[in-house]
Image (cartoon, rainbow, N blue to C red):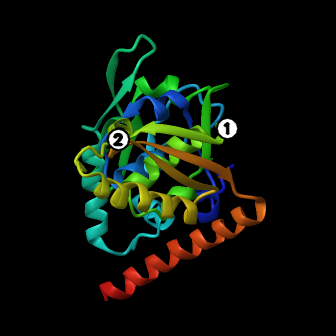
Amino acid sequence: MAKKKETLSEVRDHLVVKRNDLIQKSRYQMSLQEQKIVLYLISKVKPDDKNFKEQLFSIKEFCLVCGIDDDNGKNYGNIKNTLKTLSDRSIWITLEDGSETTLRWVNKVTINKHSGLIKLQLDEDLKPYLLDLQENFTQYHLIYTLAMQSQYSIRLYELLKSYQFKGCISFDIGELKRLLFAEQYERFPDFKRRVIDMATREINKLTDIQITYELTKEGRKFNEVCFEIHQKDTGERLDTWSSISELIDSTKDEAKKSSK
């Protein structure tokens, strides 16, 4: 019997599940689109999978899921190029003994020029962080990342989601910059405005959690940020879910109109 094709809503409802070490003890630099592609791939992993399966990446489905104009040839080209660069992207992760090592997101990407089909597979070294997770893991619905416009919003959301059970978490400013790969913002006002404030707005508007933060000083210099994290109630989450879907679909419609 042929497998029933999932609806757009069902694909957006997929869970992204990661071991906490992959979230809390890693640092990497990826564009917004690269992050969304990786999360889309991870959301395809099933709870009972023992190995990573080769995935047939559908650019059309990815565009529809993310609210990207799927009729625009330029978008297809951009996504293909992004998939190629992902095969060279590394992630730094801290091991239990304190040493750091690099991992890759995907082991290889194969694009058939004639058919346009794209095959890829998550890298084998990621198996302990994505498969058969019984404890110390974080999960969230893919949809909560799809409408975000800042690369830092996704990364901060994951970090705070992994500490949600605590209710609050503090970061040294320098360490938070390092985790978010935002060390280019040397002036704190720039880091606050372009990273913390923007990510806070998007997280509160587009996800299942509500966050606030307070800054502390050492002398004249801000040295720490403390985030409070609260789960939205069921009604708020349903409203957020609905608004995300409307926002994604309206963005796609606007993109189609502007391209005509």
Amino acid on which the number 1 mark rests in the picture: Phe
Quick check: 142 left or right of 55?
right
Image quadrant holding the C terminus, namely: bottom left
Q: Which mark is residue 104?
A: none
Identify the residue shown where x is 28% and y is 52%: 82
Amino acid on which the number 2 mark rests in the picture: Gly
Quick check: 104 left or right of 22?
left
Q: Disc 2 marks which residue?
A: 219
Q: Which of marks 1 and 2 is nearer the N terminus?
A: 1
Q: In this view, does 25 lie above or below 170?
A: above
Cα distance between the residues tagged 1 and 2: 32 Å
Q: How crowded is mark 2: few (under 14 residues within 10 Å), some or many (20 or more)?
A: few
- Asked whether residue 111 appears in the rendered view, the answer is no
Identify the residue shown where x is 22% and y is 47%: 184
Give coordinates of residue 2: x percent, y percent: 65, 51
Identify the residue shown where x is 59% and y is 38%: 163
Residue 245 or 225: which is nearer the viewer?
225
Judged from this view, the residue extending furthest toward the right is 234
Q: In this view, does 128 lie above or below 192?
A: above
Q: In this view, does 14 lie above or below 65?
A: above
Identify the residue shown where x is 28% and y is 38%: 89
Q: Residue 165 carries which label?
A: 1
Q: Total label count?
A: 2
